[in-house]
Structures are given as structure tokens and as C-alpha cells.
Image (tube, rainbow, N blue to C red):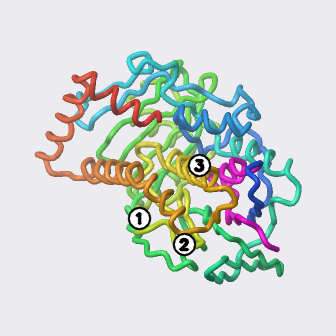
Amino acid sequence: MNVDVAIVGAGLVGASLACSLAGTGLSLAVVEGAAPPERAPGWDARIYALSPGNVAFLDSLGAWGAMDPARICPVRAMRIFGDDGRSQMEFSAYDAGVAELAWNVESGELQRALWSLLQSRSNLVYPARPVSLDVGADAATLRTDNGLSICARLLVGADGANSWVRREGGFDSQARPYGQKGVVANFACELPHRGVALQWFRADGVLAYLPLPGERISIVWSTDDAHATELMAMPPSEFCEQVTAAGAGTLGRLELLTPPAAFPLAHIAVSNVVKPRVALIGDAAHVVHPLAGQGVNLGFGDARALAGVLRDRAPHGDPGDFSLLRRYERARAEDVLAMRLVTDGLQRLFHARQPWVARLRNLGLNLTDAIPVIKTLLARRAMA
């Protein structure tokens, strides 16, 4: 099979790129070994806070309108608390001159919307797993476990943090585990959250409350492996008490809606995200700490940038031309580097236990909160 663009991985980022390229005249193939997502009972414990810029991107694809609005929650404000019990900072949509800072949505709900768009286009998604890759001067040839051979002028790796394309394509990457896990779960809360996201930098990690529709929240507790193991082993009632106490009882009594889950946290940097005939996007290209909630936003930014470069190429231009792919890499370099430095720096800063470091970080939180211009600039950059 000969195509212009083959995408390995139909997760959120890979699927969004495929949807964005549909109708451009480029022939596509999407290789994905997982089954189409189905709605599970209850709420998905994996929640993403999407920036308004990426909501607009998803809306342009038709995915945003395909989701159930009753399962999407706007974030009107965000409060961040230091670990001294006094320092804090607040961002508000009103102060930033926008209606929402972000939108919280379930991973599964968004995945289903994107897959429904993919499945509406026949012969686009191929249920298979890649087994070999041969990159030549004119094309990259991918072979799958079901005997399929795909010859693509451009191969895109959108296959996550443990990317097969990154490994087989010979990309130079550095992975550094944080020795932490992200513990996630959903709760019903006694008091209304009013669309306000809450985040505590604590001695035992970073805890975030993400508002969901109704009186519900989702949490992400990024904490050391040993503490994460303790949390996962707790009976539901004790786990609720721990999460309530860690959040200073801000939303009253919490009732567990979904069993907690945990995933390891790491920092992954890739020296160059493009090679002749091959490009990486999403977690295949970079993995950052989730304390800023920007991982999937960076991935959608990759998809937007790569799709834009491919659409703007010369008529009948080669989508796998290295100089073209370098334009994509340069377009994303600043945003990705900035987010890597911010998230990794904050993780190191708030993980340090020296008293002088604690005073410095909490002072910085208060100073930033006291300067509205800086807060607005930070908020607008994140929303883009």
C-alpha cells in the first residue's frame, strides 16, 4: 500500500492529526493496535484540562461538538497554594479577559469523538501493530503484525511515551523517571466547586482538584512512589479522608466515584523530533510532568503545527521532505522547551526540602500573585 502520510498511533494526538489532514488531498493510513474506545459506566478517571486554543482546534475538526456537553466542565478560575499554609496565587478568566481558562474533559469521551470522525472515513484506520521499519530516500516502509506493508512518503510517530517509532527510527532521547506516580480518581463533593480548579504544592507532592460537571471533581496527586503505593492500598473511606485532608476540606466531604489508578511519571526529551521521512508528535516527542496539566495540550499543538506545515507546502510538494519537516520542528521548539523547563523546574523546586528553598518558592508564589500583568501573561500563554 502506498500513501502520502502514515500515522502510527490513534490516541488523542494521532487521531487529531489524521482528522486535520483529511480533505487535504493527502492519502492517509492510521495504524492502531487498540480496539475502538467504548464508553465505560461512570466517569473516566483520566481528565484533561484543554486550553481554549486547542478547544478551537478540536471544534474545527468537528470533534468538540460531537461530545456530550453534560460531560464537559469549564474552568473559570484556578487557585494555587504553597506548602507553607499561607502563600497562594489565583488566576481568573475574568481578569484574563476570557470566558474560560480551560475546559475539563474525560480522555475517553474525547477519544470516542475523534474515533467517530476517523471511522466515518472508510479504509483509514488499520487495526495492526508495527513490527519493522525501513526508511529509504523516497519513503518509509512500515510492516505490521498482520502482514500489511505500508509505504509512506511521511511516517508520523504518535504512539505515546514508549514510542515504537521513536525507538525503531533511531531518535536520540533521554528519559529520567521522577520516582513518582500520578494517582487519579473522581469524587462527588459536598460543597460546590464553582468551576474553580485547585492545586496544592505539598511536602508529599502536588495535589490538584479538577472540576467536573455537577458537584464532582477529578484529582491528580503526583507523589513519591512509596506514598502512591500507600494511597492505592487504602480502603475507599480512608482514601477519601486523605484526599479531603490534603485539600484542607475545601470542598467538604468527598465520596469516591471511581477507583483510584496510578501511572509512573517521567521526563522524556528528544534531541530532534524529525528525520528524513519521519516525524514525532505528542508524547512520542516529549513527556513533561503533569503538574501544569499541559501534556496533551503540547501534543495537540504538535498536531496543529504539523498539519499546518503539510497543508501549506507547495502544490504537489513532498510531505516527507526534510526541509519541510524542519519547519514543523522549529515551529514547536520554543513552546515545548518552555514547558519542559517550567514543569521540570517547578517539580525540582517544590520537591526540594531545604528551608531556604521553601522560603524562596513561597515568596515567588506571593510575588507573582501580586503582579496582575505577569499573571495575565502567564494565563494567556497557557490558554494559547
Name the foreground residue: 284 vs 77. Answer: 284
Instruction: Return the residue at label 3.
Output: 308
> Residue 192: image x %, image y %?
53, 18
Residue 166 tag number: 2
Using the image, determine if residue 202 lies above or below residue 4.
above
| Residue 1 is at least partly visible in this image | yes
> Residue 261: image x %, image y %?
57, 52
Name the foreground residue: 106 vs 313. Answer: 313
Q: Which residues are magenta?
A: 1-22
Left or right: 295 as drawn, with respect to 307: left
Q: Classify residue 90 by image quadrant.
A: top left
Under tag 1, what secondary structure?
strand
Using the image, determine if residue 205 lies above or below residue 198.
below
Residue 269 tag number: 1
Residue 8 lies in magenta, yes or no? yes
Q: Are marks 3 and 2 in contact (CB under 8 Å)?
A: no
> Residue 250: image x %, image y %?
42, 24
Left or right: 33 as drawn, with respect to 104: right
| Residue 234 is at least partly visible in this image | no
Which three-letter amino acid code belongs to the residue tagged 3? Gly
Under tag 2, what secondary structure?
helix
